[in-house]
Each structure stands twice: as C-alpha cells, then as structure tokens.
Image (cartoon, helix red, strand yellow):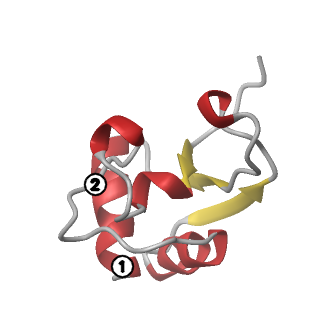
Amino acid sequence: MIKRRGYLVWAHYFNKELSRSEGRRVPTRVAKRNPTAEDLLKAAASLGWEAERLDLRHPAYWWRPGVAVLIKAPEEVRKREVLLRLAERMR
C-alpha cells in the first residue's frame, strides 16, 4: 500500500446523477453534474490547498477510467469537511 499525505478524493463523490449508495458523498444541493479533475483542482487551488491529479481506477469501478485527486488540506480539517468545501467551490 502506498502511503500518501492528504486525502484521496474521487470525482464521483460530487456527481449529482449518482445516489449515495452509488458513491456520491455530498448533498445533491451542492453536487455537480459530471465533475472533472480540473474542477477539483481549481476548487482546491481557490481554497489554497495543494492538489495533484492521479491516474487511478476506483476499486469498486475498476473497469471504468477513474478521476482521483490527492488533496493536501491542513491536518485539522477532516475529509468530510474537505468534501463539502470543495463541492461548494465547484458550484
């Protein structure tokens, strides 16, 4: 297992067209249709966080090309809060 500093965030966490059971992690009021890695990178930059795009496939959807971004937020910020802040910036 590769150790990384930061949070691994998948674009489908913010997809408005997915249900929670399909992998969406933010409320639909702040979710976006078909978010891209560029959307995540811009949102992270606007918050002053470092972000790096990773070419990975999500383990649950290994047959689909995935979009993952490593977000290096301050350590005191939890992942749930990171997701909500990114979603609000992408809207």
Q: Based on the displayed image, in which of its 4 quarters is residue 31 positioned?
A: bottom left
Q: Position of residue 43 (x, y in %)?
A: 48, 76
Number of labelled discs? 2
Q: Nearer the viewer, residue 68 or 77?
A: 68
Residue identified by numbered label 1: 89
Residue 73 seen anywhere in this rendered image of the structure: no
Q: Residue 26 carries which label?
A: 2
Q: Which residue lies furthest to the top in this view?
A: 1
Q: Nearer the viewer, residue 84 or 48?
A: 84
Q: Give the residue drawn at x 28%, y 59%.
A: 84
Q: In this view, does 65 lie to the left or right of 38?
A: right
Q: What residue type is labelled 1?
A: Arg
Could you tell me how far apart the alpha carbons at marks 1 and 2 are, in whole angstroms?
Answer: 13 Å
Q: Position of residue 82 (x, y in %)?
A: 36, 54
- What quarter of the picture does the N terminus occupy? top right
Secondary structure of the residue carrying tag 2 is loop
Q: Give the residue drawn at x 39%, y 67%.
A: 86
Vertical side of 37 occupied by 3: above or below: above
**Which-is-in-front pick, marks 1 and 2?**
2
Q: Which amino acid does label 2 sit on?
A: Val
Q: Based on the displayed image, in which of its 4 quarters is residue 42 positioned?
A: bottom right
Q: In this view, does 77 lie to the left or right of 48?
A: left
Q: Position of residue 41 (x, y in %)?
A: 60, 73
Q: Position of residue 36 (x, y in %)?
A: 60, 72
Residue 79 seen anywhere in this rendered image of the structure: yes
Q: Give the residue drawn at x 52%, y 66%.
A: 49
Label 2 neighbour load within 10 Å: few <14, some 14-19, many 20+? many
Q: Give the residue drawn at x 52%, y 71%.
A: 35
